[in-house]
Image: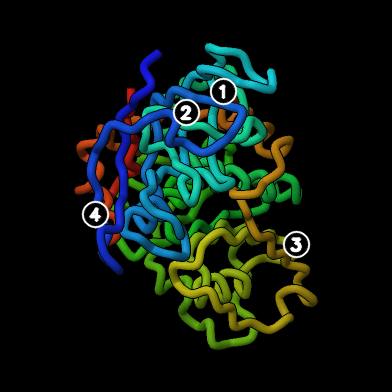
Amino acid sequence: MSNTFKALLVIQPEKKVFTRTIVERQIDDLPAGELLVLVHYSSLNFKDALSAMGNPGVTRNYPHTPGIDAAGEVLSCSDGSFVPGDQVIVTSYDLGMDTDGGFGQIIRVPSQWALKLPVGLSLRESMMLGTAGLTAALSIYEIEQGVVKPEDGPILVTGATGGVGSLAVAILAKAGYQVVAATGKMTEADYLKSIGAADVIERNDVTQGSERPMMKPLWAGVVDCVGGEMLAAAIKSTKPGGIVTCCGLVGSSDLSLNVFPFILRGVRLIGIDSAECPMTHRTEVWRNMATKWKLTALESMVEEVGLEGLEDKIQSMLKGGLKRRILVRLS
C-alpha cells in the first residue's frame, strides 16, 4: 500500500486568508485512531463549505482536509473492531471538522466512529444520503416512534429543496406519508413533486398569521430544517399530539414562542443531533434507509464530482446556488 494519497487541503497562508488545493498527503500526517479507511465516496455539506473557507466555528486548526462524510473500505483496524476489506460508513463526530475528513482518499479515525455498511446499500448510495440523509431519517424515525401515522394527516417539510429537506420529502413519501413541501424556490416545485411531495407551498404560506399565539392546526408532523419564525409557525399550526422535529437554523437560531401549542395541543418538539447520535440508534436508522426506506430516485437527487470539481460546488453552495446534493468520488 502506498504511503501517499490525494486530498483537498485547506491552508492558511496569512491571517484570515484560506486557500484550497489538491495535494499528495502522507498517511503519517493523519491524526491518531484505530481505523484506517480507503475512502471511495464522500458528499458536500454546508459544514464542509464553511470549513473550506476557514470558518473558526467549524474548524480551528489548519492545514486541514474537510469532509464530514466518508464511505469506503477498511485498510487496517488496530483494535479488531473491523477487518481489512470491511465496507464502512463514517459520518459526524469530529470527522472533517478538526479531524481530517472525507475529502481525502484515506482517513484515520477512532473505530467507534464507523459502522458497517448495511446490506442493501452500496458505498455510493450511502454517500448520496450521507449526513443529510441520516439527519432526515432520524427526524422521520422520531415521527414514527411518536406514533404519528400516515392517516393522521400531512407532514410539513420546511427548507424542502435543501439536502436534509429533499431527502426528508423522499423518505416520508416512501414511508407512506402525505408530504407538503415548503420552499422559497417555487421553480423547484416539479422536482419536489417528482421525489414524493404531494403538494408544494411557498414558505410565506407557512408563516402567514404567525403573529398569533395559535394557528389553525394543519400538520400531523413537521420536519423543520429552517428554524426561527418558520419553526415557530410550524409548531403553532401542528395538530393535537403532533410531532415537530428541529434540525436547522438557517432562518434563525432564536425561537420566539409561547407554551400554548405544548399545553393545549400536546405538540412535541424534538431536536435532532446527528453528530453525536448513539451508535445503536444510528445503526438502526441506516438499516431503515437500506430496507423499508430505501429510495429508488437517489440518482436524480445528486450530482457527482471528483476532488477537482469541489471548488466550484463549494462556492455555489455558499451562494445558495446548488440544486442537488453533491456526491464526491474519491476512488
Mark 1 lies on a secondary structure that is loop
Of mark 1 and mark 4, the one earlier in the sequence is: 4
Which residue is found at the position 61% from the left and 21% from the top? 77
Of mark 2 and mark 1, the one earlier in the sequence is: 2
Who is closer to the viewer here, 234 or 88?
A: 88
Viewer-nearest of labels 2 and 1? 2
Say which amino acid is labelled 3: Gly
**In which quadrant of the rendered view does residue 330 lie?**
top left
Decide: is 175 above or below 269: above
Viewer-nearest of labels 2 and 3? 2
Residue where numbered disc 4 is placed: 19
In the image, taking residue 59 as reference, residue 233 lies left or right, namely right
In the image, taking residue 193 as reference, residue 316 lies left or right, namely left
Q: Which mark is residue 117?
A: 1
Q: Quadrant of the C terminus?
A: top left
Of mark 4 and mark 3, the one earlier in the sequence is: 4
Q: CA distance from mark 4 to mark 3?
A: 50 Å
Mark 3 lies on a secondary structure that is strand
Are there few (<14), some (14-19), or many (20+) residues within 10 Å of tag 3? some
Residue 63 position in % (x across, y down): 36, 49
Residue where numbered disc 3 is placed: 241
Residue where numbered disc 2 is placed: 71
Say which amino acid is labelled 1: Leu
Of mark 2 and mark 4, the one earlier in the sequence is: 4
Q: CA distance from mark 2 to mark 1?
A: 8 Å
Say which amino acid is labelled 4: Thr
Which residue is found at the position 73% from the left and 81% from the top? 259
Which residue is found at the position 52% from the left and 69% from the top? 227
